């Protein structure tokens, strides 16, 4: 029998998982920088364990030659959303990307599994580039809410423990818990707009504060230190009032002051050169 070089086989999958997690985290960062509500709450990824790959190959009667085509979740990414509505938004972002080609959808939201499992799976083709060259691999992206993830994590552990022979009383409880999760997601959806507003202003405030402090730090380097200390005191005074409008006004004024100092510094620099 031919020797299977597992470590070698898994290298592009490990790379894909790292890259994909980084790309989804980058999306989170971009939303924050643009003061936008982010439909992604958490991202994680894993390469399927060899044990789990072997078990799946056996269960699905997959040959060695078919391994990379038929076991589609060797590289697995999980995107967790706060709300049910966010799942479609994330799926749409993925559909529009040129670096992830959607090959297949497994919609366990509209087709809940008998176990009660709910999630939205996208099988994608993704290019990796290693020392061995370019390779297209498959990866599975699971998109679900925090609540769905809570249920799936518990159920997965129990499935592992009972290896397909879950006692009926547990199956019954899990099924009831799945109903509660569905209800919980519906309840949460009803307050989504309010939560989004709150989160948007939280992100906005944190960006305004970061901008102000950045401006103060820049001013410190090329203007009168005593003036900057006064500006900083004024900032802390306004910050304590917890009034976003005042903070925004101060932000705009500071921008103008900083612009003035920058122009002054540039004039000095040009004068020095002439
Ligand atoms: P891991 O790596 O431990 O998560 P399947 O026949 O369901 O095993 P299939 O048809 O290839 O696999 O694809 P599917 O249904 O999309 O399942 C792939 C993954 O979805 C599973 O990976 C689980 O992570 C998750 N999943 C699917 N069904 C269930 C379920 O009923 N309960 C829970 N908790 N998770 C589920 P693996 O293979 O289990 O391994």
Image: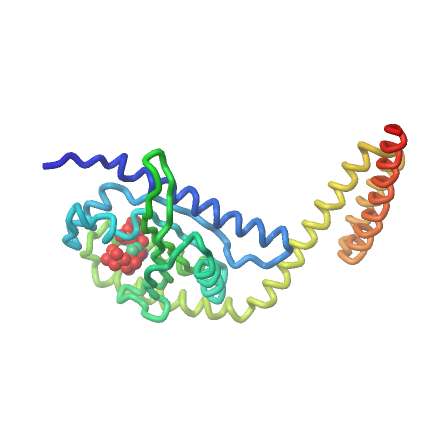
The quarter of the rendered structure image containing the C terminus is top right
**Colour pattern:** rainbow
Question: At 70% across and 45% down in the image, what residue appears?
Answer: 210
Q: Is residue 23 above or below residue 97?
A: above
Q: Quadrant of ligand 1?
A: bottom left
Across and down, in percent, residue 228 comes to 85, 37
Q: Give the image quarter of residue 179.
A: bottom left
Which quadrant would residue 261 be assigned to in this image? top right
Residue at the (86%, 28%) spot, across then down: 273
Q: How many marks?
A: 0
Q: Residue at x 27, y 42 (%)?
A: 49
Q: Residue 45: x and y, percent?
A: 39, 46
Image quarter in which the N terminus is found: top left
The reply to whether residue 156 is in sight is no
The reply, left or right, for residue 216 in relation to residue 113 is right
Foreground residue among 272 and 262: 272
| Horizontal and vertical percent position of residue 114 | 26, 67
Residue under the point 73% across and 41% down:
214
Observer-nearest residue: 129 or 234?
129
Residue 230: where, in percent of width, then height?
87, 39
Q: Is residue 137 visible?
A: yes
Would residue 121 be found to the left or right of residue 36 on screen?
Answer: left
Q: Residue furthest left?
A: 1
The quadrant where residue 182 appears = bottom left
Residue farthest to the front, as pictured: 274
């Amino acid at each position: 029998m031919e020797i299977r070089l597992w470590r070698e086989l898994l290298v592009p999958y490990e790379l894909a998982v790292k890259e994909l997690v980084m790309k989804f985290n980058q999306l989170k960062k971009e939303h924050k920088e643009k003061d936008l509500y982010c439909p992604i709450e958490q991202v994680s990824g894993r390469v399927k364990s060899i044990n789990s790959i072997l078990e799946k190959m056996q269960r699905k009667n997959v040959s060695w030659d078919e391994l990379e085509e038929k076991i589609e979740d060797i590289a697995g990414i999980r995107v967790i959303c706060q709300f049910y509505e966010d799942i479609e938004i994330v799926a749409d972002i993925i559909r529009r990307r040129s670096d992830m080609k959607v090959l297949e959808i497994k919609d366990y939201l509209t087709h809940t599994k008998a176990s009660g499992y709910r999630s939205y799976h996208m099988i994608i083709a993704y290019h990796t580039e290693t020392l061995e060259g370019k390779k297209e691999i498959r990866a599975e992206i699971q998109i679900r809410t925090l609540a769905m993830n809570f249920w799936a994590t518990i159920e997965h552990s129990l499935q592992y423990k009972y290896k397909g022979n879950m006692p009926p009383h547990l199956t019954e409880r899990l099924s009831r818990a799945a109903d509660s999760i569905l209800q919980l997601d519906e309840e949460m959806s009803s307050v989504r707009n309010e939560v989004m507003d709150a989160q948007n202003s939280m992100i906005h405030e944190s960006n305004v504060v970061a901008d102000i402090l950045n401006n103060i730090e820049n001013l410190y380097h090329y203007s009168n230190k005593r003036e900057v200390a006064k500006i900083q005191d004024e900032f802390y005074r306004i910050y304590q009032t917890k009034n976003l409008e005042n903070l925004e006004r101060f932000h705009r004024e500071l921008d103008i002051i900083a612009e003035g100092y920058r122009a002054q510094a540039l004039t000095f620099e040009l004068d020095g050169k002439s």
